[in-house]
Image (cartoon, grey):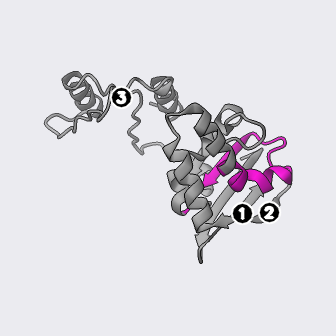
Amino acid sequence: PPGAVLIETVWGEGRYHAIALRQRDCRALAYAIGTADDVGAAVGAVREAWEDAARFEQAARALGQLVYGPAVTAGFFRGARRLFVVADGELALAPLDALPAEGDEPLLTVLPVSYLTAARDLMRLRQRFRPGVRALVVGGPDYERGGAAKEALQVASGERGGDVIACKPVHGSWGALAGARTEAERVTARLGG
């Protein structure tokens, strides 16, 4: 897509590398992220610090520098309108969109970030939705309502008697994800539903 930047990480032979591609000028950059041990420790630090804002910011900055630093230095994010990330190995366990690339702001507050399973997934974005093909769009689940949510899901899917698994949080409660229902409604409208 116009203004897109792709960063694909690859793990092999005990090291992580990245390939950055920029749509605007068809530029490519390959760089080393670090050893598997260094990346594993940085990912672990981010995951362990999740509930402590100060520790998380420090750990996120360190991992962000490893993953995005060379691309930032090479100017890959200047003028970018969207970032696509393919995370390999332990990097797939880290919230790469919550890491800062430039400054202290998490990427997701500056730029839309989309995760891909592989760079070839970008080719699917060029495909248009074909009329007659059905899609199930789910948004704004209410994990706290149990029976009512089950009934609503069965009605929405047009099926009765199917199994619906109730999800209950292990600790505390899960609040509604802001904007999830609106996003699902917009996707549904875009698909012609």
* Residue at screen point 45% across, 26% down: 177
Please state if 114 lies on the left or on the right of 50 as rendered: right
34 above or below 76? below
Q: What kind of residue is marked 1?
A: Ile
Judging depth in this view, the residue of 121 and 100 nearest the camera is: 100
Residue 29: mark: 2
Residue 53, percent from left and from top: 58, 32
* Residue 41 or residue 88, whichever sits in front: 41
Badge 3 marks a residue whose secondary structure is: loop
Q: CA distance from mark 1 to mark 3?
A: 36 Å
Q: Position of residue 126 (x, y in %)?
A: 63, 51
Q: Amino acid at mark 2?
A: Leu
Near mark 1 (Cα within 10 A), the count class, few <14, some 14-19 or many ≥20, is: some
Q: Is residue 49 magenta?
A: no
Q: Are marks 2 and 1 in contact (CB under 8 Å)?
A: yes
* Residue depicted at x 67% and y 36%: 106
Tag 3 or tag 1, which sits nearer the N-term?
Answer: 1
Label 2 – label 1 distance at C-alpha: 6 Å
User: In the image, which disc is placed on residue 19?
Assistant: 1
Magenta residues span: 63-88
On screen, residue 84 versus residue 30, left or right, reads left
Q: Nearer the viewer, residue 134 or 107?
A: 107
Q: Viewer-nearest of labels 1 and 3? A: 1
